[in-house]
């Protein structure tokens, strides 16, 4: 896998176009069938609302060969690939998955200083229908815009559940704390 040489400038939204059980199933397919070094996406929104950790952002993605606007590099080099499990050509996203997607998109934009206008669909830059004709794109943009512009009062609690590989746990906890959020490790046992 190639190291990223330019900072992340875009958030690229995808769907898997499948019915995978979780992030690890996608990773196994990308590594064992496609022969890639890791999963192609940097993050995955599972149907349950769990955020699966994908490819480390220090590496370019394997999620979009489309050209970034005004750039010579493609979106794999400049984008954070966030994919939702499901086929939104034929199916509808659940409210739980949608809410998790909005929260994760806002977190990624804040973490990497991605402006709202740099949130894009895979199909915006590549010849594909991804993330699907039934993906709630306008509703998604509306909700992300609200959250990104909102001033949250101190009496509002927001909870986000993130599934993390053991090897990445400490790094993810540090990133969450560095962003000014409280973090609590929960056991799934």
Image: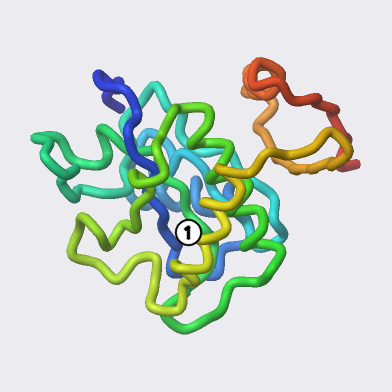
Q: Residues within 10 Å of mark 1 (few under 14, many from 20)?
A: some
Query: Which residue is disc 1 drawn over?
Result: 141
Q: Is residue 38 left or right of residue 96?
A: left
Q: How many marks?
A: 1
Question: Front-most of 47 and 27?
Answer: 47
Question: Front-most of 22 and 185?
Answer: 185
Question: Front-most of 28 and 58?
Answer: 58
Judge whether residue 18 can be spotted in this image: no
Q: Is residue 133 left or right of residue 75?
A: right
Q: Position of residue 42 (x, y in %)?
A: 46, 39
Q: Position of residue 88 (x, y in %)?
A: 47, 75
- Please give the name of the residue rendered at 71% of the width and 63% of the height, measured from the top-left corner: 96
Quarter containing the C terminus: top right
- Please give the name of the residue rendered at 49% of the width and 71% of the height, measured from the top-left corner: 136
Quarter containing the N terminus: top left
**Element assignment for label 1:** helix
- Please give the name of the residue rendered at 45% of the width and 68% of the height, measured from the top-left corner: 138
Judge whether residue 48 can be spotted in this image: yes
91, above or below 171, in the image:
below
- Please give the name of the residue rendered at 45% of the width and 79% of the height, measured from the top-left corner: 134
Say how the picture is coloured.
rainbow
What is the quadrant of residue 76 in the picture? top left
144, above or below 35, in the image:
below
């Amino acid at each position: 896998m190639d190291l990223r040489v330019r900072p992340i400038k875009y958030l690229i939204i995808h769907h898997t176009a499948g019915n995978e059980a979780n992030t690890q199933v996608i990773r196994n397919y990308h590594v064992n069938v496609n022969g890639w070094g890791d999963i192609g996406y940097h993050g995955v929104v599972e149907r349950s609302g769990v955020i699966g950790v994908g490819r480390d952002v220090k590496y370019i993605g394997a999620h979009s060969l489309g050209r970034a606007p005004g750039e010579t590099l493609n979106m794999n080099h400049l984008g954070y690939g966030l994919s939702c499990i499901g086929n939104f050509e034929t199916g509808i996203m659940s409210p739980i998955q949608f809410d998790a997607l909005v929260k994760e998109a806002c977190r990624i934009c804040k973490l990497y200083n991605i402006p709202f206008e740099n949130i894009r669909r895979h199909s915006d830059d590549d010849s594909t229908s991804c993330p699907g004709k039934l993906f709630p794109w306008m509703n998604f943009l509306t909700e992300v815009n609200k959250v990104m512009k909102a001033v949250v009062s101190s009496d509002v609690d927001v909870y986000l559940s993130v599934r993390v590989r053991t090897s990445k746990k400490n790094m993810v906890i540090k990133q969450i704390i560095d962003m000014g959020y409280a973090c609590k490790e929960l056991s799934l046992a």
